[in-house]
Image: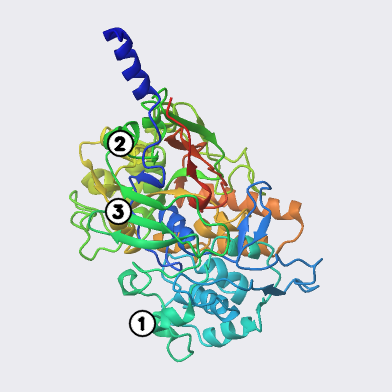
């Protein structure tokens, strides 16, 4: 006889040990929205992760050996020992693997690899990633001069430097560049030249490339279509409802993915993400230190809060010359108490005042729950040239007041100012940081007014690239494990971040370039120490903390691999097994 108590216990046990929900589908919920599927466009990790599930690069990072590489589209990793790197370090011969096909069934060739690399460097959008490969391959970080004009001979030089010879891709560099292969492990995924040309993208010809230089995002056929060689193909992207579906590519040249589908959805509200995770309708969700405490101990949920992270979060860039045209974030556009001028933060005293207004200790205590430390400079811990003793500014409203009084020859203090702090919707830590800054700055004068506004991720990126944000809240991570990556990005006038904010110091440029050319590690580290001291003096941005990364997922998720150097989520390795308990 079954009693009521035993029946209740049985039902409770059935719920407690519920089977895996949707075993062939992996659902990821994020607050950030996918920006594009164009392999040559993004600098942010959401789009990069999706792109690296659809396309493949020449190499991949070896998750078992930090910094080591594995061949992917390439059949071998070139070295001097195997004869694929010349004795002078300037010529790389990269054999392309045979038998790989694109999702449309067409074969991948060395010419496709060449086209993809040329397309990546010649597209060269403002603030984009092209400089990562322009610099090593052509010896220049940009295809355009300071007036925005295309430099003479750029395509000719690129065509000579990047060639397809039989089944090999051959790269001829102007000078040795040690990080090159690491960059190729995350950048310039191989696309189909014929498919691109037939769909209206660049046809690979010298006469037409300038039409595709510095394009608008919506002009690219790759924005919302894809034809790669990766483990998943694009099933659909519902941009209106912010849902993207990847389907397993059964013709994949390696072992097929274990999952039939991966669904990525944008859900800005943490509460909704949490409820869907609890119900098993999501397998992985985005969270931060401020929200992860609400997830600890939930049945069936696993929180990994100690993942290594080689960067700083957040970094706040000061805009030296904001774009005033149709800009809703600068008020009147003048220093009249109702707005700010475009060069508001070109005044160093104003940058100093804001830097002393950030409550760094409160951020570490309240947002990161003590699981973070102050970032000391653009070179993060674990990278050559990091200086743990580098000077940093502290939270000091007295000093902030002094600098506010000096800024703009006293006009800022007398007239006041009004502008908008913008953060990407759903990013709780940046929202709190904006609220903290607003509170501290407005406490110093009733004439200081800061509004706060959230933008969805694509809109935030569009406003950033259009140079409309007076203060830019971002994360700061190296693109590859070498100090030149973060140093060039934020301190060189042609770096992706510095160029958008309008920061330029010839001495910073000189130090970045000299450190790159230096082969002695100790001498190179000293140059980066000097650069970080200049970073402190110039104050083009404010770095906050280095913190461990977080991952929140159901405990039925298996096969997860984590590499802090790569944005690739490796969905093809993930599967679901077991019961929630």
Is label 1 in a helix, a strand or a loop? loop
Classify 397 as above or below 192: above
Q: Which circle, 2 or 1, is nearer the viewer?
A: 2
Rendered location of residue 100, percent (x, y): 57, 71
Callout 1: few (<14), some (14-19), or many (20+) C-alpha neighbours within 10 Å?
A: few
Numbered tag placed on residue 200 in the rendering? 1
Total count of labels: 3
Q: Position of residue 168 (x, y in %)?
A: 66, 78
**Which residue is pictured at 52% across the width and 85% down the height?**
155
- Within 10 angstroms of label 3, few (less than 14), some, or many (20 or more) residues? some
Q: Position of residue 4 (x, y in %)?
A: 26, 9
Q: Label 2 belongs to which residue?
A: 276
Closer to the chain start, of discs 1 and 3, is 1
CA distance separating discs 2 and 3 = 15 Å
The residue drawn where x is 27% and y is 54% is 242
| Mark 2 touches mark 3? (CB < 8 Å) | no
Residue 17 or 511: which is nearer the viewer? 17
Give the camera-side residue of 407 and 168.
168
Residue lying farthest to the front in this orientation = 1
Relative side of 445 to 384, left or right: left
Q: Are marks 2 and 1 in contact (CB under 8 Å)?
A: no
Which residue is under mark 3?
Answer: 243
- Residue drawn at x 42%, y 52% is 260
């Amino acid at each position: 006889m079954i009693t009521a108590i035993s029946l209740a216990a049985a039902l409770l046990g059935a719920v407690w040990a519920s089977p895996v929900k949707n075993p062939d589908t992996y659902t990821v919920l994020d607050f950030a929205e996918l920006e594009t599927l164009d392999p040559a466009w993004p600098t942010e990790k959401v789009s990069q992760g999706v792109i690296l599930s659809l396309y493949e690069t020449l190499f991949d990072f070896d998750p078992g050996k930090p910094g080591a590489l594995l061949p992917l589209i390439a059949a071998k990793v070139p070295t001097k020992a195997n004869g694929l790197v010349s004795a002078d370090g300037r010529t790389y011969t990269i054999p392309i693997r045979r038998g790989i096909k694109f999702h449309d069934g067409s074969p991948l060739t060395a010419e496709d690899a060449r086209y993809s690399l040329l397309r990546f460097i010649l597209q060269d959008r403002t603030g984009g990633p092209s400089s990562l490969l322009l610099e090593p391959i052509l010896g220049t970080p940009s295809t355009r001069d300071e007036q925005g004009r295309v430099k003479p001979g750029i395509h000719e030089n690129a065509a000579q430097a990047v060639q397809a010879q039989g089944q090999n891709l051959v790269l001829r560099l102007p000078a040795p560049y040690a990080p090159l292969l690491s960059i190729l492990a995350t950048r310039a995924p191989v696309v189909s030249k014929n498919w691109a040309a037939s769909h209206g993208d660049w046809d690979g010809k010298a006469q037409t490339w300038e039409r595709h230089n510095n394009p608008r995002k919506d002009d690219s056929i790759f924005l919302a279509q894809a034809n790669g060689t990766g483990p998943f193909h694009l099933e659909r992207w519902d941009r209106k409802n912010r849902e993207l579906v990847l389907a397993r590519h059964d013709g994949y040249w390696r072992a097929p993915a274990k999952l039939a589908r991966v669904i990525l959805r944008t859900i800005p509200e943490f509460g909704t993400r949490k409820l869907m995770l609890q119900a098993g309708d999501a397998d992985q969700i985005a969270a931060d230190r401020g929200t992860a405490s609400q997830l600890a101990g939930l049945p069936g949920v696993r929180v990994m809060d100690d993942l290594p992270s080689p960067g700083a979060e957040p970094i706040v860039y000061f805009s030296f010359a904001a774009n005033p045209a149709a800009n809703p974030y600068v008020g009147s556009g003048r220093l009249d108490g109702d707005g700010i001028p475009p060069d508001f933060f070109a005044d160093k005293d104003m940058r100093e005042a804001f830097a002393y207004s950030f409550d760094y200790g409160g951020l570490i205590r309240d947002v990161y729950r003590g699981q973070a430390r102050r970032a000391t400079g653009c070179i993060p811990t674990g990278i050559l040239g990091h200086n743990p003793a580098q000077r940093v500014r502290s939270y000091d409203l007295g000093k902030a007041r002094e600098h506010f009084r000096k800024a703009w020859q006293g006009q800022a203090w007398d007239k006041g100012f009004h502008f908008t702090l913008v953060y990407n919707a759903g990013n709780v830590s940046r929202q709190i940081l904006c609220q903290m800054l607003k509170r501290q700055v407005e406490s110093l004068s009733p004439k200081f007014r800061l509004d706060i506004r959230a933008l969805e991720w694509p809109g935030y990126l569009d406003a950033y690239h259009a140079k409309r944000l007076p203060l830019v809240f971002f994360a700061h991570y190296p693109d590859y494990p070498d100090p030149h990556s973060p140093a060039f990005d934020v301190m060189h006038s042609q770096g992706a971040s510095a160029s958008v904010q309008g920061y330029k110091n010839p001495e910073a440029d000189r130090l970045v370039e000299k450190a790159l050319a230096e082969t002695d590690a100790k001498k190179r580290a000293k140059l980066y120490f000097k650069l970080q001291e200049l970073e402190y003096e110039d104050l083009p941005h404010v770095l906050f903390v280095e913190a461990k990364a977080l991952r929140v997922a159901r405990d039925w998720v298996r096969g997860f691999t984590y590499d802090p150097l790569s944005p690739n989520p490796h969905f093809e390795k993930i599967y679901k097994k077991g019961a929630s308990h």
